Image (tube, rainbow, N blue to C red):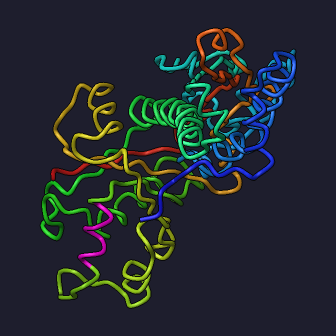
């Protein structure tokens, strides 16, 4: 299995070695330069590649003194009186619900992280260890973005203007505890009934649910019909890649969904309902509705050298980003649930 390391070039290794120079001015300048060189690769890894929300939220870059506001009659012109929006107020907070007023203000807040290591590692240019430390620093930002983004989505899916929890209960053609293509079909119909023009484009489920779909593709009978193209997609695509041929719905695998996993537990905490061992979240991400999910980025990722650590024989970096999350129209979401 290929290990996920923070890869860097030879120039940065030399910059790391200079950070341990006995000349205070040389070392100080090198540490500042080293921290500055981390910005681009970490930004790319966190915002572009590493998160699980990039295919859901639209990124909106916000200037330092700019207020990000959305008039309600533009967000949902046909149903101004029948919608709700959710805005994350701070990292780890409870998303705020908006159901009235003339506009929605998307707040931005700071997320922070830091890491340090022994200065001798810099002197030896031991990138194997330092690279692992930088990876932890990077992944800390990624997790905070994922958690805030998904928490906003989960609140919107449960508390939104239209709740549609689809289950296999009472459906003799669906096997209890099995996530099947029949549930996808029912979810697709439910989304279409939320409001005119709504369409289920994406569904996020656990690895176990994705396995159920793959297993169902290995056999066919009168109760479990599946066309050849759908079967081929499910059997050939790696689990980390969505399948796009299940009634035109992309099925995305999300590690944090599933019995006992972080977002499943978050869902139980939000709803107070542990009836269903697994849940999935559906989205309308058509071109007309994708901007219902907003990731606000105010300024850029900033990374700094922690100068106070030098007298302790250590070196480290700290940094922050100013971000915000909003589900501007919860009618673009639905949830499905089933017992494992």
Q: Is residue 47 left or right of residue 40?
A: left
Measured as percent of width and height from the top left, residue 77 is found at 70, 37
Q: Which one is nearer the viewer's eye here, 297 or 268? A: 297
Q: Which one is nearer the viewer's eye here, 124 or 219? A: 124
Measured as percent of width and height from the top left, residue 39 is found at 76, 36
Quadrant of residue 183 within the rendered picture: bottom left
Q: Main secondary structure of the magenta part?
A: helix
Image point (35%, 50%), residue name: 280
Q: Is residue 7 left or right of residue 234?
A: right
Image point (46%, 31%), residue name: 151
| Farthest residue, direction front | 22
Picture mark count: 0
| Farthest residue, direction bottom | 228
Q: Which residues are magenta?
A: 209-216
Q: Is residue 135 above or below residue 197?
A: above
Image point (56%, 33%), residue name: 145
Q: Is residue 106 visible?
A: yes
Q: Is residue 90 left or right of residue 205?
A: right
Q: Quadrant of the N terminus?
A: bottom left
Quadrant of residue 335 within the rendered picture: top left
Quadrant of residue 199 within the rendered picture: bottom right
Q: Which one is nearer the viewer's eye here, 321 or 251? A: 321
Is residue 239 one of those drawn in magenta?
Answer: no
Q: Is residue 71 visible?
A: no
Measured as percent of width and height from the top left, residue 337 is found at 26, 48
Measured as percent of width and height from the top left, residue 165 is found at 31, 45
Is residue 210 one of those drawn in magenta?
Answer: yes
Q: Which one is nearer the viewer's eye here, 226 or 195? A: 226
């Amino acid at each position: 299995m290929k290990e996920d390391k923070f890869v860097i070039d030879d120039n940065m290794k030399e910059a790391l070695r200079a950070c341990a120079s006995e000349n205070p001015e040389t070392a100080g300048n090198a540490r500042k330069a080293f921290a500055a060189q981390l910005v681009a690769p970490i930004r790319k890894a966190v915002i572009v590649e590493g998160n699980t929300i990039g295919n859901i939220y639209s990124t909106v870059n916000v200037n330092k003194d700019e207020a990000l506001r959305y008039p309600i009659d533009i967000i949902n012109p046909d149903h101004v009186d029948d919608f709700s929006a959710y805005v994350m107020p701070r990292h780890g907070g409870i998303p705020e619900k908006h159901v009235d007023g003339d506009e929605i203000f998307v707040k931005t807040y700071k997320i922070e992280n830091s890491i340090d290591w022994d200065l001798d590692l810099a002197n030896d240019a031991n990138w194997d260890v330092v690279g692992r430390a930088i990876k932890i620093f990077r992944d800390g930002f990624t997790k905070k973005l994922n958690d805030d983004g998904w928490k906003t989505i989960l609140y919107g899916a449960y508390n939104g203007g239209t709740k549609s929890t689809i289950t296999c209960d009472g459906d003799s053609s669906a096997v209890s505890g099995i996530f099947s293509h029949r549930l996808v079909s029912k979810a697709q119909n439910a989304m279409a009934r939320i409001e005119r023009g709504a369409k289920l484009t994406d569904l996020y489920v656990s690895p176990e649910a994705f396995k159920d779909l793959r297993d169902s593709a290995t056999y066919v009978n009168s109760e479990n019909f599946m066309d050849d193209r759908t079967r081929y997609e499910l059997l050939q695509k790696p689990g980390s890649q969505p399948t796009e041929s299940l009634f035109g719905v992309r099925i995305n695998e999300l590690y944090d969904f599933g019995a006992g996993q972080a977002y499943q537990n978050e869902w139980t905490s939000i709803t107070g309902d542990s009836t269903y061992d697994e849940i999935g979240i559906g989205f309308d991400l058509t071109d007309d509705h994708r901007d219902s999910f907003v990731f606000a980025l105010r300024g850029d990722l900033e990374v700094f050298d922690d100068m106070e650590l030098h007298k302790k024989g250590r070196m480290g970096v700290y940094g922050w980003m100013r971000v915000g999350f909003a589900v501007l129209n919860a009618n673009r979401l639905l949830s499905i649930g089933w017992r494992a």
